Image: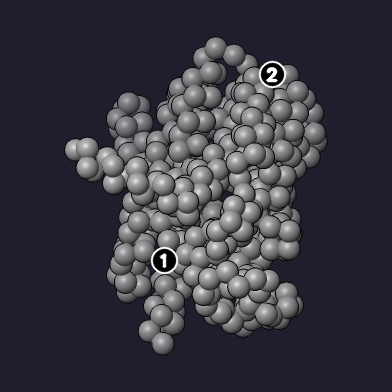
């Protein structure tokens, strides 16, 4: 036993591994804080709609979400360029600071137009997370670790959503929805202060060489491999992206998958209205979706690096098929005549497996592909791909709330998701096939 422990501690004495763990932990904490703030509105949704002083409908709630997606869209088109130019650390810390300020302010107002602006600003800040982390991962981690690193980082998003729905949902039993925003913003501000000291922008800041898969044009640290886009201008890189079928297909896939993931924003309201839950109960029950996502993406990141592209294609497409079956079950529940308790139990199981089924396809192919194909322009590429996804989600948020407000709204809402799910399966299948063919060259 002592020998095994000594080996573990001796590994941690390796400065590169120790700093990789510090950087990974910093990104995990920071992105978790960003997701905590984003999920706060989702958890607070039923309480805000029931607040007589706000006069907020599901349509209005959808518009708040839609303006947030507009902020995300703008951020995805800009933060990647900024991160590639100034480094991931600066952008990541700026994102945390802006988010903390915006989300605390959100809880202090009641005007719908102010909600639009503040949530736009909040998700503009959150959108910096993925491009800035792509920049950090590229310079800190070798290529063969990218899948597992993205898998771990992705669990930060999901674990934070679980904590938010359970912790903040439980707080709704005790305090007003406004206090949830104060708590989330305060935690994010503390995370920003901690990372200001511990998060380093590049290995050279602590006397380490770049990983083997990264070229350093300013020094001779280590032996690096060249990437086709290393010395290409931004306009040249954009032209390369625009000519790639794989880029277009992953953009279409992510549009569909982002809409499917955006179902999470409506789950508390859906559960409350469909199964007669209280505000706090619906918020806590909605944690079943991020729990499924968390389990799925944690396993998926490690599997991603170890299986062939062909096997990956089969697994991910089959998983999306399971997600489509879960949506089908939710859609027909109202017609099956189950008791309220049985219907709720079946709905939560379907939502759990829906999260498990779609999450790996949402997080991993796009993240790994962006670094492999984008090289030094990975921040730009990942931002562009995400921009397509959030543009689709923005439209869905504006439309989805209005659809849910109409008679038979949730049935029509779920039918839209089902059609989007079919499109996700088709587009992801073609992307994974082309990616597999490219790997064989």
Q: Residue furthest top?
A: 174
Q: How many marks?
A: 2
Q: Position of residue 231 (x, y in %)?
A: 67, 80
Q: Quadrant of the N terminus?
A: top left
Q: Examine the rendered structure and indicate whether residue 294 appears above or below residue 364.
A: above
Where residue 219 sits, quadrant-wise, is bottom right
Dot 1, how many residues are within 10 Å of its Cα: few (below 14), some (14-19), or many (20+)?
few
Kindly report which numbered mark, 2 or 1, lies closer to the viewer in this rendering. 1
Q: Residue furthest bottom?
A: 441
**In the displayed structure image, the side of residue 223 where residue 361 appears, left or right:** left
Residue 144, disc = 1
Q: Residue at x 77, y 25 (%)?
A: 109
Residue 52, disc = 2
Query: What is the CA distance from the residue labelled 2 to the residue labelled 1?
Result: 54 Å
Q: Residue at x 80, y 36 (%)?
A: 113
Q: Residue at x 69, y 76 (%)?
A: 238
Mark earlier in primary sequence (2, 1): 2
Q: Position of residue 80 (x, y in %)?
A: 68, 61
Dot 2, how many residues are within 10 Å of its Cα: few (below 14), some (14-19), or many (20+)?
few
Q: Examine the rendered structure and indicate whether residue 247 appears above or below residue 116.
A: below
Secondary structure at numbered mark 2: loop
Q: Quadrant of the C terminus?
A: bottom left
Q: Residue furthest left?
A: 1
- Seen from the viewer's position, the closer of residues 290 and 222 is 222
Whether residue 388 is visible, yes or no, is no
**In the displayed structure image, the side of residue 102 where residue 17 appears, left or right:** left
- Seen from the viewer's position, the closer of residues 32 and 328 is 32
Residue 58, disc = none
Q: Position of residue 381 (x, y in %)?
A: 62, 67
Q: Position of residue 288 (x, y in %)?
A: 40, 36
Where residue 364 sits, quadrant-wise, is bottom left
């Amino acid at each position: 036993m002592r020998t095994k422990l000594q080996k573990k501690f001796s590994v941690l004495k390796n400065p590169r591994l120790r700093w990789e763990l510090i950087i990974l932990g910093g990104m995990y904490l920071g992105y978790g804080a960003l997701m905590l703030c984003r999920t706060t509105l989702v958890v607070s949704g039923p309480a805000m709609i029931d607040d007589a002083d706000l006069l907020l409908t599901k349509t209005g709630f959808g518009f708040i979400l839609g303006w947030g997606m507009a902020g995300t869209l703008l951020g995805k088109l800009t933060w990647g360029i900024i991160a590639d130019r100034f480094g991931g650390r600066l952008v990541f810390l700026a994102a945390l600071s802006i988010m903390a300020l915006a989300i605390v302010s959100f809880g202090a107002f009641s005007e719908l137009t102010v909600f639009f602006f503040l949530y736009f600003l909040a998700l503009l800040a959150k959108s910096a997370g993925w491009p800035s982390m792509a920049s950090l991962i590229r310079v800190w981690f070798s290529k063969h670790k990218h899948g597992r690193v993205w898998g771990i980082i992705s669990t930060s998003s999901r674990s934070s959503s679980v904590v938010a729905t359970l912790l903040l949902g439980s707080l709704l039993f005790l305090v007003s929805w406004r206090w949830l925003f104060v708590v989330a913003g305060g935690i994010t501000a503390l995370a920003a202060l901690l990372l200001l000291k511990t998060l380093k922008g590049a290995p050279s800041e602590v006397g380490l060489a770049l990983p083997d898969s990264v070229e350093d044009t300013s020094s001779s640290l280590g032996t690096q491999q060249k990437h086709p886009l290393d010395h290409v201008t931004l306009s040249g890189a954009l032209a390369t992206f625009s000519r790639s079928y794989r880029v277009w297909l992953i953009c279409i896939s992510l549009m569909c998958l982002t809409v499917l993931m955006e179902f999470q924003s409506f789950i508390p309201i859906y559960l409350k209205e469909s199964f007669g839950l209280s505000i706090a109960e619906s918020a806590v029950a909605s944690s079943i979706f991020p729990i499924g996502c968390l389990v799925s993406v944690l396993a998926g990141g490690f599997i991603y690096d170890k299986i062939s592209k062909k096997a990956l294609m089969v697994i991910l497409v089959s998983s999306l098929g399971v997600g489509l079956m879960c949506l089908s079950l939710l859609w027909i529940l109202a017609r099956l005549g189950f008791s309220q308790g049985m219907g709720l139990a079946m709905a939560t199981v379907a939502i759990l497996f829906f999260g498990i089924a779609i999450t790996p396809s949402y997080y991993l192919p796009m993240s790994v592909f962006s670094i492999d194909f984008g090289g030094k322009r990975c921040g730009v590429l990942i931002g562009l791909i995400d921009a397509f996804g959030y543009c689709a989600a923005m439209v869905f948020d504006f439309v989805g709330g209005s659809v849910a407000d109409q008679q038979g709204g949730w049935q029509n809402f779920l039918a839209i998701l089902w059609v989007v799910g079919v499109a996700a399966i088709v587009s992801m299948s073609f992307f994974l096939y082309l990616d597999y063919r490219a790997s064989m060259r």
